[in-house]
Image (cartoon, grey):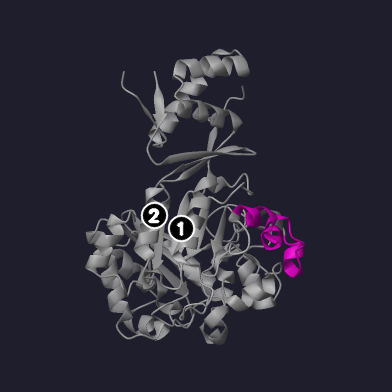
Amino acid sequence: MKRNDFAKTLKEHDELVFSAPLSVSLEITSQCNLRCKYCYTDAGEKQEKELKKKEILDLIDDLYSIGVGTLVFTGGEPLCRPEFFEIARYADEQDFTIILSTNGTLLDAETALTLAESGFKRVQVSIEGNEAQHDTLTGAKGSHRKAVRALENLERAGITPFVATTITALNVKGIISLIETICEDTPAQRMRLLRFLPMGRGETARELDVSINEIKKVYVKIQELRKRIKGPFEINFSDAFNAPFFDRPSHPCIGGHSWCCITPAGYVIPCNYFSSPDVIKILGADSIQKKEFITIWKTSHLLEKFRTPPELKGDCNTCDVSAECRGGCRAVSFSYTGTLFDMGPLCSYRGGT
Amino acid sequence: MKAKLRKGVRIRPEAFGGVVQIKDGGAFQVDPIGFDIISQIKEGIEIDHIIKNMKEKYEDSPKVEEDIHKFTQKLVEEGVIEIEKE
């Protein structure tokens, strides 16, 4: 017998392709009560072919039977869907880890308690800057106040609140101050920084784009901030920033390997960033309204593109770390260059100066 | 000594061994030997019997017993299994 401890954390990503995803991001509606300028999926109105409740419950059965462990409910705004709690409870009863990603504006004290009763232990709320910045980006006056209150409501209900913030031109200068405020003045336990991409509604808000040089400056300041922060508060960057430059071992995109997203109309895509209907048309995704999920997982040409070592283009083709990151975030590449395999100057390792 | 999977723990086989997922916890990747051990625990086989099985399947070395005890201890610490009281 080989002497070892037989177990490794998945963070090591030794094995990339799994027989089924470990985690699925389930966009249960495209409805949203906000119209955030940076929204990569152009959420707002309900889509015509949105999965019906029965289809979602059947899907949850399917995902359970193939061993998926975590469901992340997102949208749109999941709380806009009237059957949301019924669907969430159904998943919780099947022993899924369930997580909610919300804009927080509909999350009052009573809703927080219902979330706790439905099995949620962790909820992520979007906060996009100080009050003025947040309300400008969401287009809804008072949305910042409601989002902050949502964090407090969640804590009182016994749920661990997290914060997600998309770095944009509007908030980048105040991002350190925002993190300090979230850490010191709210019960949030973690802050996740997301990358703005000109996709969905974001395509018409390119003025919000942030250069890689500015992001690098933020990164350096966050390294300093981490030393000052007391307690268990975590700050991390989404995989869209993935590159050895940042503070963890580089790994390839996990989309289509251990994780995927299912859109409101049932399309199986490697990552939420591709969930805009226009993008789905270009990429050619399969829907669970036509095929079983596991068949799509095993045969989808789109997912396969994310699994096979890509034919990298441009700078990625000659980069010294491309074997590790395999070209980084496909969504960044796609949204700026129109190809999935060329990060070009947008890479946080080689891009910028 | 008998152990059992804790409530909310799910395991599934993979080409590289298997995956252990803990509800509201983390996930672990285990190699084929580790997955074999966890599968036997799930079936309700006593630890001493698992050691015997593993010695037969692989090699009869004193390290086998030590390794399995260390592994099961780690599984207890990670919240994957619990030791049943006699």
List x then y, in percent, for residue A149.
26, 71
Q: Are marks 1 and 2 in contact (CB under 8 Å)?
A: yes
List x then y, in percent, for residue A69.
48, 48
Q: Could you tell me which residue is drawn at 45 percent across and 67 percent down? A: A221
Q: Could you tell me which residue is drawn at 60 percent across and 56 percent down? A: A292
Q: Could you tell me which residue is drawn at 66 percent across and 73 percent down? A: A334
Query: Which residues lie in the magenta part?
Result: A294-319
On whether residue A316 falls in the magenta region, the answer is yes
Residue A39 visible in rendering: yes
- Res B83 → quadrant: top left
List x then y, in percent, for residue A58.
49, 56
Residue A67 visible in rendering: no
Q: Earlier in the sequence, mark 1 or mark 2?
A: 1
Q: Could you tell me which residue is drawn at 56 percent across and 66 percent down? A: A266
Local packing at callout 1 (Cα closer than 10 Å; few below 14, some 14-19, many 20+) is: some
Please name the amino acid that badge 2 sits on: Tyr
Q: Quadrant of the C terminus of chain A?
A: bottom right
Vertically, is A309 above or below B9? below
Please name the amino acid that badge 1 sits on: Leu
Number of numbered discs on residues: 2
